Image (cartoon, grey):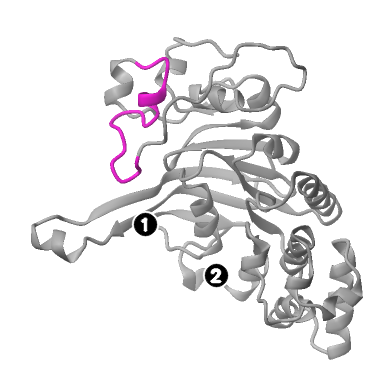
Amino acid sequence: MPDTPLLKVDDLAVHFRLPVPLAERAMGKKPTTLKAVDGVSFEIGKGLTLSVVGESGCGKSTVARLIAGLFRPTRGDITIDGANVTASKNRTRAIRRRLTMIFQDPQASLNPRWRVHDIIAEPVKAFGIARDKGDIKREVDKLLEQVGLSSADGEKYPHEFSGGQRQRISIARALASKPDLILCDEPTSALDVSVQAQILNLMRDLQDDLGLTYLFISHDLAVVHHMSDRVAVMYLGRFVEVTEAPTLFSTPRHPYTQLLLETIPDLTMANRDREPVAGEVPSPINPPSGCAFHPRCPHVNDRCRTERPKLLSINKTAVACHAVEESRIPSV
């Protein structure tokens, strides 16, 4: 990676205090804490893509929202191009312009009362990209054409478009401030498979043309394989494995990563034995002691039940697993 990463996150965490119903409070029940993200660290170099993958509820979307400033972190630091933006007062106009987000459901993230032109023009005007009415229209038309739509589409409302077209509008809006970093929160999960491929290819082309940097959130490993330079596997608020994308898919180290990869369809029809992901994700309100994955791990021992593993670098892969550290399980 470059010496100065575009995005650097250090020990980022957010804990939510859950309210207690009045009747239970009267019986002496105390509030509980949900550790949605519990200390993650990573870097993304300029022009690269880091994907965060994991099952629903693991905290991956919360990471994106923390970086976007939608949640206030309990601890940790967020640095964009050398500037610490953890505190909201440090998010200057210039910093906010460089960071945008694409949400999962375009139907929910686009204002149904606004025409597409006004939706895309809002950040153009807010950040002073263009001020004259004619210049704003030319900028919006250019953005629409850049994502595969026409300038005439600017006069329509979001409900007049298909799901894939609405996501193209969301991408155009994200590009309107001329950002360096785009946070992609499962941007294709609400779309049909054939449309997903079109949107992903569009995002790759835009990255190549504009030098964009992506933090890509997904639960779909096939999508992650297509988009990523590096991959972070997340489980119950923490990273369990971080490595280069080719390494992760060829030589997964953590047992959870190995089980996740078993869910990818085998197009070779080799009829090999598969090990499904056992059990369910434990409650983050009351996580297991030691390694959070130990109730589902086929390689568990007493140390796994009592001691939380640290994220250690082993052969250029950062992995949090006692079994890997002790060479009790081979890589696959």
Along the viewing direction, whichever of 235 and 41 lies nearer the viewer: 235
Left or right, 97 with respect to 211, comes to: left
Residue 156 image point, x, y percent: 81, 78
Picture quadrant where residue 165 is located: bottom right
Q: Any magenta on residue 292?
A: yes
Q: Please name the residue shown 79% across and 53% down the image.
A: 211
Can you say whether 132 is above or below 27 in the image?
below
Can you say whether 88 is above or below 318 in the image?
below
The residue that label 1 is drawn on is 74
Q: Which mark is residue 279?
A: none
Left or right, 178 with respect to 105, comes to: right
Q: Tell me the amino acid under the disc marked 2.
A: Arg
Q: Quick one: SS at disc 1? A: loop
Which image quadrant: the N terminus? Answer: top right
Can you say whether 197 is above or below 330 in the image?
below
Mark closer to the chain start, 2 or 1: 1
Q: Tell me the amino acid under the disc marked 1.
A: Thr
The magenta stretch is 283-300
Residue 162 image point, x, y percent: 78, 62
Q: Please name the residue shown 44% across and 9% down the image.
A: 328
Residue 242 image point, x, y percent: 56, 33
Which image quadrant: the C terminus? Answer: top right
Specify few, some or many for label 2: CA neighbours under 10 Å numbering under 14, 14-19, or 20 or more.
Answer: some
Q: Any magenta on residue 163?
A: no
